[in-house]
Amino acid sequence: MKHLTFYLGLILLLVYTSVTQASNIPENENPEKTSEVENFDYRNGMLQWETYAGVDVKFFLIESSENSEKWKLVNEVDAYEKIRYKHRYTFDLRRPKKFYRLSVINTNGDIKQIGVIDTSKKE
């Protein structure tokens, strides 16, 4: 009986370990992705976006505009550099303007515009 309890405990430990490790497997870099950011959206008064594994992002620029022509810097959001897992970012818009633009500054200094959102059409 003592050996049976030992082996059952060992089996449960192995199953638990394999399940928890499977949930922590990093996403592989996908060479088909054309952007450092996915799912840039506006919901419940917040801008939201995600970065995927293997992307080297230094920080994000959030800009606002009333007419999508003249842009004003709202904030810089520090990124988690060289992440191994997908990461979700949010930014609370206290007094929403009409348009918001998200740009990425990579660790090598390149700037890439991600997209523009018209918040008046989202809620």
Image: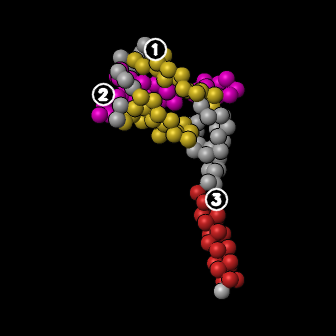
Camera-side mark, 3 or 2:
3
Magenta range is 96-123
According to the image, label 2 marks what residue? 120
- Image coordinates of residue 109 in percent, x first then y, are 67, 23
44 up-or-down from 2: above or below: above
Q: Earlier in the sequence, mark 3 or mark 2?
A: 3
Q: Residue at x 34, y 35 (%)?
A: 44
* Amino acid of disc 2: Ser
User: Of callouts 1 and 2, which one flags the residue occurring earlier in the amino acid sequence?
Assistant: 1
Is 16 or 70 nearer to us in this picture?
Answer: 16
- Residue name at image x 68 percent, y 83 percent: 2
Can residue 31 be seen from the camera position used here?
no
- Mark 1 or mark 3: whose residue is earlier in sequence: 3
- Vertical arrangement, residue 96 with respect to residue 11, above or below: above
In whole angstroms, how far apart are the C-alphas of marks 1 and 3? Answer: 44 Å
Density class for disc 1 (Cα within 10 Å; few <14, some 14-19, many ≥20) is few
| Residue in front for this viewpoint, 82 or 101 | 82
Residue 14 pos. (x, y %): 66, 69
The residue beneath circle 3 is 21
Q: Amino acid at mark 3?
A: Gln
Disc 1: which residue: 72
